[in-house]
Amino acid sequence: MRCFTVTAFDVIPSIPVSGLPYPHIAVGEEGRGRTLARFPVGRRFAEGLAYQAPCPRRGGMGANLWSKSSCPLCGTPGVPDGNFFRHPDEGLVTLYRPVERASIIKTKERGTLLLIEEANSCDRRALVLADIQAGFRGYTEWTGARYGELPCPNRGTEMTCTWEDGCPRCGVPCPSTSGYRHPDAGTITDWEQFPPNGITVLARGYKAQGDAGRMGGHAVKLLLMEPGAAFRVKCSGRLYGAPAERFVAWDGETLHLGTQDEVWPPSCEAPEGELI
């Protein structure tokens, strides 16, 4: 199946692979007010993606760059320079090429989900790393892409006596004779809940703004999308003219990103109807 990374403005036909502490797809980030989930990449698959590159810390200097005078990235011993250590112009690190096509298995030993080399080229699902940012000091809200009449989410829920006049979402009575339990009835008009049909959430993380993570942020999710699946992300905060809603839809060939009318242009509807 094909792999994509989606941001608020771009669809990238690959997913980056991180190497430490083991090869994985990073979902979210580390730090205060943040959450990082690691989706593991199989060892054999990772070896095929690996390549050597010069250590990015070459030429760096500082007392805190290395533990025991060695670079933590490449292991090269630092050269003493006064009260500091200098990284010599040597040392290699292992990096990984982004994944463009892959498959997922559930291991027999521990039941771990694992990304491996593509085993079925006919698989029309898509693996999507959704990293859609909020506005400055804002947050994101995820829903399905369908808006309309839906079953009330309170169906089957035990209510309190203050709800005897009716569910505040759909108005269906929840009398004391039924134990204030919401009957299997009632509809609302709203966006469908996330994840909608056709989408499986494989991992969840969170990225935040500000050192303490309290200036806003957004969820990051690794999704498995069936052909025809779609979702919506509502972005709050200072957007500086950017759209407040982003829709993502997978048709089995192309991953579409944009506003609702960009993803589903009205001009593509069948030219049938009543004259006005």
Image: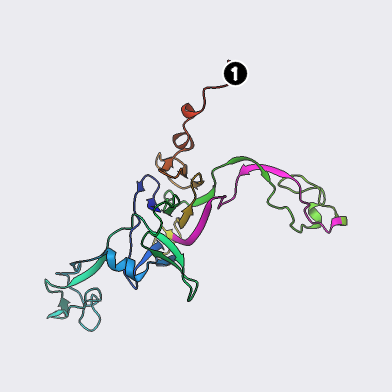
Instruction: Please give the count of numbered marks on the rendered protein.
Output: 1
Image coordinates for residue 116, horizontal then vertical, percent: 38, 64
Q: Is residue 170 visible?
A: yes
Q: Amino acid at mark 1?
A: Glu
In the depicted structure, whether residue 249 falls above or below residue 36: above
Report whether 172 appears left or right of 29.
right
Q: Residue at x 47, y 26 (%)?
A: 267
Q: Residue beneath label 1, please?
A: 274
Residue bounds of the magenta highlight: 178-206
Residue 28 visible in the current orientation: no
- Residue 228 magenta-drawn? no
Residue 81 point in image, percent of width and height: 12, 79
The percent coordinates of residue 121 (x first, y second) are 39, 53
Q: Please state the horizontal and vertical placement of residue 13, each as a whole percent of the image.
A: 34, 50
Question: Closer to the camera, 84 or 169?
Answer: 169
In the image, taking residue 194 as reference, residue 125 lies left or right, namely: left
Compare residues 212 and 248 and report the one nearer the observer.
248
